Amino acid sequence: MKSHLHAIAMVLFAICFLYDIVVWGGVMGLPDVGAGIADSAHREAPLATTYIAIGTPLDEAMPSLRDYATARLTEAFGDGFERIRDDPTVAMDLIFSTTWNATHRLIKAMYWGAPIMLLLTAILWVRRPKPVHAFRR
């Protein structure tokens, strides 16, 4: 089992990363607040900017992913839309400060889960058990 931990961490990284690019790629599809969130992310959150940049073309190419992302973001960030409309420069501060609901908590966990799983994958890859050969062939 120990020899496969890096593979498990890699799969978890892939799940987190795919979720992030799909969901954050739908930010521009949010009416009235999407551009404000994207601008705030561009100024304050390089990881969110990366997810948005990679995910936006994917969500535009597949309307079902865009609809899913918009629904998840509306459900998660809906409580903060009024404050984001009033002052879009604080969007990232609002999104990452308080947790409004379970969907918001999941989005924040997956946001940080991808880089953590990537680091864990690298550490486990370096520390994986190496095969030992007793005799030369």
Image (cartoon, grey):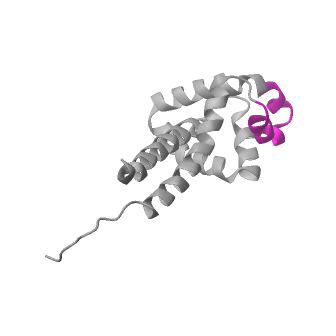
Is 15 positioned to the left or the right of 29 in the image? Answer: left
Residue depicted at x 42% and y 53%? 6
Magenta residues?
A: 81-98
Above or below, 23 relative to 67: below
| Res. 28 visible in picture | no
Above or below, 60 relative to 32: below
| Res. 84 visible in picture | yes
Residue depicted at x 53% and y 43%? 55
Question: Residue 34 location, x and y as percent?
Answer: 69, 35
| 13 or 120, nearer to the observer | 120
Name the outermost residue toward the bottom. Answer: 136
Is 118 positioned to the left or the right of 32 in the image? Answer: left
Question: Residue 80 location, x and y as percent?
Answer: 78, 27
Above or below, 63 relative to 53: above
Question: Residue 22 location, x and y as percent?
Answer: 52, 38
Q: Main secondary structure of the magenta part?
A: helix
Name the outermost residue toward the front. Answer: 134
